[in-house]
Amino acid sequence: MLIDTHAHLNFNAYQRDVGEVIRRSLNNGVWMINVGTQYDTSKKAIEIAQEYPQGVYAAVGLHPSHLETGLIKMKNDKKEIEEETNEECFDREKYKELAKSDKVVAIGEFGLDYYYRPKTAGEKELFKQKQKEVLLKHLDLVQELNLPAIFHCRSAHDDLINILDIRYKIENAKIKGVIHCFTGNWEQAEKYMKMGFYLGFNGIIFKLNLDEIIKKTPLDKILIETDCPYLTPLPAVASAEADATSLTRNEPSYVKYVAEKIALIRKSSFEEVAETTAQNAQKLFEISPLKKTIEIKKP
C-alpha cells in the first residue's frame, strides 16, 4: 500500500479523465489526499473524495500564491484552473465550513512563498507580512478543528520555523503536520522534526540532490507525495506506462517511483519504505487502513 499525501486531481489537468486516474491508482494500491489551493479547488477536492468510500481524501486551504496582497500578480496556471480567477482573501468561516466534511483530513496547503515577490524593499516586507498574517489564521483553524496542517514553504523556511517555534514554545500550541515538498537544508529539517513535523518528498528528489537529508531523516518522519500534475518522476517520463499525451503529467500511481528512489538512497527495501510511509500517513491524517490487504506492487 502507498499513500500519495499531496495530489491535485482537483486541478484542471484532470478535467477529462479524473475518474480513470483515480481508478488506476486505487487498483494499484495507492491512496491519495487531494489538496486545495484556494476555495474552488478545496471544494472540488471534497466533491471528488465524496465519490469514493475509501482511499480518496481532501485537504482545504489557501495557497500563498493565491493570496490577495495587491503587491504582485501571479500568472494563471491552466493546469490548475482553466478560467482566470481573482486573488483571494482568506475567509476563515468559509474554509471552516468546508472542513466539516468527513472527507477532509487536513488544512492545507497554506504557508509562505517568497519565490515571486515585489521589487522594492518596502513592498517585499509588506508582502511577507500579509502572508504571515494569513498563515496565522490557518494555524488558528488547525488548532480549533484539531486537524493536521499541510505546509507549503518556498524560499521562506527560516520565517516559517520562527513562527512555528513561537507557537510551540510561547503559546504551547499543539500542531501536527507535514512540510510538503521539503527542499530546505538539514538544519531546517532537524528543527521541523524536533517540533514533531513530517517531511514530504516527491519527484523533486530526481531534480535536486536531497540524498543526504533523506539518508539522515528517520523513515518514521517521512511522507511520500506526487504534487501531481507537477514534478513527474523521471522514471515515469521514460516509462512505457506514460503515453504520448501525458509524458509530463504526474499522477498518484507514480508515487511508487518516489518510494523506490528513497529506498535506493537509504539502501532499504521498497516494501519497507512503502509500508512505513503509509503508516506515517495513516497516523498523521487518521486514515483507516484498508479492510482487505492490498499487495504492494514493485515498480
Image (tube, helix red, strand yellow):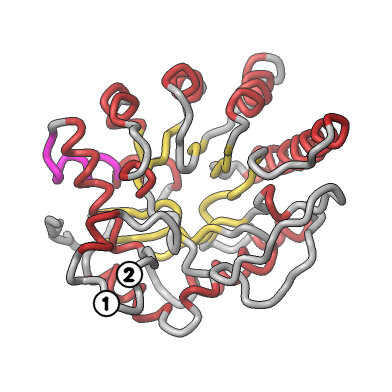
User: From the image, which quarter does the N terminus lie in?
Assistant: bottom left
Measure the alpha-carbon separation of dots 1 and 2: 6 Å
Give, as a single range, the part of the protein colored magenta. 268-277
Q: Looking at the image, is 96 positioned above or below residue 183?
A: below
Identify residue for label 1.
243
Q: What residue type is labelled 1?
A: Asp
* Residue 76 seen in render: yes
Q: Is mark 1 on a helix, strand or loop?
A: loop
Identify residue for label 2.
247
Residue appearing at x 67%, y 69% in the figure: 40
- In depth, the one of 207 and 22 nearer the eye is 207
Few, some or many residues within 10 Å of mark 2 (<14, 14–19, 20+) = some
Horizontally, residue 126 falls left or right of residue 94, namely: right
From the top left corner, tell me how far across and down residue 199 is, in percent.
42, 35
Few, some or many residues within 10 Å of mark 1 (<14, 14–19, 20+) = few
Callout count: 2
Residue 257 among those drawn in magenta: no
Residue appearing at x 71%, y 61% in the figure: 97
- In depth, the one of 168 and 77 nearer the eye is 77
